[in-house]
Amino acid sequence: MVKFLSEEWIEFGKKYILEKLDPEKDMKNISTSLLGIIEHVPPNDTTMSFYLELKDGKLNDFKVNRSGSFEEKDAKYVIRGNYGTYKDILQGKIGTAMAILKNRLILKGSKMEALKIIKPLDGLIESLRKITDEFEE
Amino acid sequence: MKQDNILALNKTFFDEAIAIAEKGTHCGMCRIDFLETGLCPSGKKYGFVAYWPQGRMEIIKHLKDGKIKPTEKLIEIANSCTLCGICDKQCNFATQLRPEKVARALKEYVNKLDKRKLQTIDEDDILKGLREIVGKEWATNDPVIIASYIRSIIPPGVELNFYIVMPKNTEEVSKIVKFANKNNIPFLPRSGGTALSVATPTVLSNATSLDHGIVIDLLRLKKLEIHPENCTAVVGAGVTAFELQKAAYKHKLRANVAEAGAHYCANIATTGVITTWGNSYGCLADNFIDLVIVDNDGNIKKHSDMGISNPYTTEHGFTNISLNPSYIITEATAKLFPVFDDEEAIFVPFDNLKDALDMVIELGRRGVGLSLAVLSYKYLAEFICPTPKIAKDFEDICKNYLKLRYVVDVVCDKDDKKIVEEMAEYTIDQSFMKTLILGSPKLASLKDSEFMKILSEEENPLKAIFAGPMRKHFEKGLDATPEQLASVHDKDLQDFFKKVYSKPEMTNVVWLHAFRILPSRLMRQRMTMGPGGAIWAGDKNHILKWVDMFAEVGNKYNLEHALGFISPLDNGKFIYIEYDYFYNHNDPDVANRISKTLLETTEKSLVMGHIFTLINYLFKGIYRKEHVLYPLFEGLTKEEQELFREVLHSVLGEFEEW
């Protein structure tokens, strides 16, 4: 178990996804990319981001920028929200779809297309939930 | 509330207070001065919902079930009530409840409390920060005050991990949002809270409410300016529909407003003000000239700012659903419209929906009338009858004896009135409607009478009553007087209600359409859920099929249901339909059936196509109707239907499918 957005978190996440998620069954062979921008990260109110890329249901890239955001143009979808929202999602207090529909995550890109990948994304987040136990306070 | 405290009270008295509190549905009518009684002095002074009658009703339930413990604030809340009786008058008009008994029970309860054992609530850093923004008295984390917001923004069953804050202006709202973001705390604005109350007993409860965080109560944003020179009003987020309309009427102007207790700005944000005046006055972004909003980052923006991207457009398609606003409207510059001296209301009765629909669409396309709708017998009965029992009997008479199932309801000037009269074989005029309002108890008492039986055997009972020789006798026989109508209220309130029903506006149908004080009766002592939405007006069979679908689903789940209203939009190109289901909000089984009804009717509507459902309407009010309604999307494909259910499961979790 590791801290959200740490280097270990990325490595654990990659390993878990590769080993436990079936590209066809769990990830529905989707090819997409997602940039998550995390604002108001404690304790210094900074911004961080992660970039996740899937190709045919397989993890192609997963990285974290701890001092700002990656280029938005590189991702098919961009979601933006504060640290507390991401924390609530990873703790299972709110689902990704609900966070988008409640405007706690602001989505850039087609909502229709984004909702189509919700189910496989939910599986991915479920995996990340299992390896994340520490958050910034 | 601990058992020994309950026993210390007069049990019958306390049980009665709880029973009243459980029947309350938070219609919000106790927060507007619609009977000229003045406002609840305690609510007016302290602001938080806890100090209003509806808040006390919520608090006493949670004291009883032990969810909250007494605090210093509870004593202040109980003692701030002067037992002036205003709430009894207001609530009795709308719901026939007596909330003052709840206030008395709370007073008795706090009098018996051991003041040394009160729960103390510490000020934490978040509360300190919020108080620095709004002042000490306008932010709290007291569980008693928090509990008063349950069911109107806080879902039942969650921990009371909240702060309630009451800003006084846009700048304070902006600071609160920035503060909340910096501290990673979710927030949600609250205005009248009625829409949230309607959602709370259903599967939508968690989707629309706030499960923890900061409730931004907007009641203090009371700015209200009427500018007759350009027919506009500047309206703060704390101003209700009733207050705006009252101010506008002083200048012979009228606003397009929702139910009396709804806050104008919140109504723009949620559904864009759905009314029977929409064909003439507009809908969605037609309603306003400009808005001041605070976005999710806390930035203050105006719709008229040159530097922002188009604020009037939104993504198209059935997945464009928002369950919370992505902005807080703190001020709106609303459009106002002239009130004409020759305005009148006229009703055309029908025994079937198809003919009523034909007429209302025709009138809508020709631009006849200011307010235009088909109302069902159910709406008519609920609105004009002073008690649920009278409404029920009135309904039976309309439906089974008079064959009065629908009325086309038109508010218009004298020229348009002539057009309506020429189109209809017979009509109900304003004077007869006044008779029906004041004589509703007498009419209801005629249920199962010989007179009604004879009337029902007529080939056309409607014609016999409204256009034949029976009309004069019928009108006379109804004994339509304020005294008669007042006599159905509790004895101690009858003098008051006699004066109320003697006021011209209380039987002036145009005034009642404009000020909308009667829809609260749809929520009296039970809840109403009114799905529906907009549909192309061009295909009448499609419309009738849609209405039939709502009825079939209502029958399937064994619910009390009826069409509410149908009103044209955009010169009769669309019509808006509300279909109502009525249920006991304290019964989890029926609430479950209501949830299924809501989901099933939404899915079926989307599959039918060319329909913009109520769920899609939510939080589209700031966009142009041209972007929202044009074109209405086709019916869902099988693949899209699967996606719809996937999204529902992601959002709502596990639920029983249909």
Image (spheres, rainbow, N blue to C red):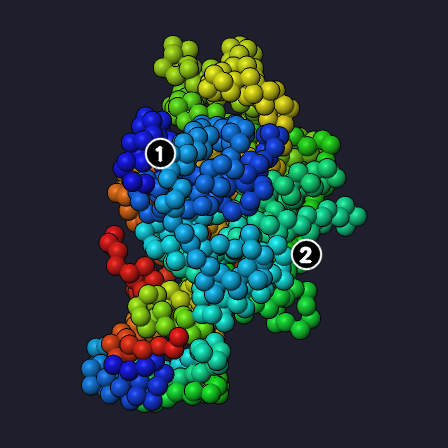
Residue B392 in view here? yes
* Pick the front one: B159 or B370: B159
Q: Chain of mark 2?
A: B
- Image quarter for residue B333? bottom right
Which residue is the site of mark 1? B18
Q: Chain of mark 1?
A: B
* Pick the front one: B358 or B311: B311
Q: Residues within 10 Å of mark 2 (few under 14, many from 20)?
A: some
Q: Which label sits on residue A4?
A: none
Which residue is the site of mark 2? B289
Which residue: 33% across, 47% down?
B67
**Which amino acid, mark 2?**
Ile
- Tell me the quarter of the image containing the N terminus of chain B: top left
Which residue: 36% across, 69% down?
A88
Which residue: 56% across, 20% down?
B496
- Give the image location of residue B379, x and y in percent: 46, 33
Pair 2/1: label in front:
1
- Give the image location of residue A136, x and y in percent: 38, 77
- Image quarter for residue B409? top right
Residue furthest to the front: B116
- Image quarter for residue B207? bottom left
Direction from residue B342 to residue B277 in the image, left or right: left
Which residue: 45% across, 62% down?
B124
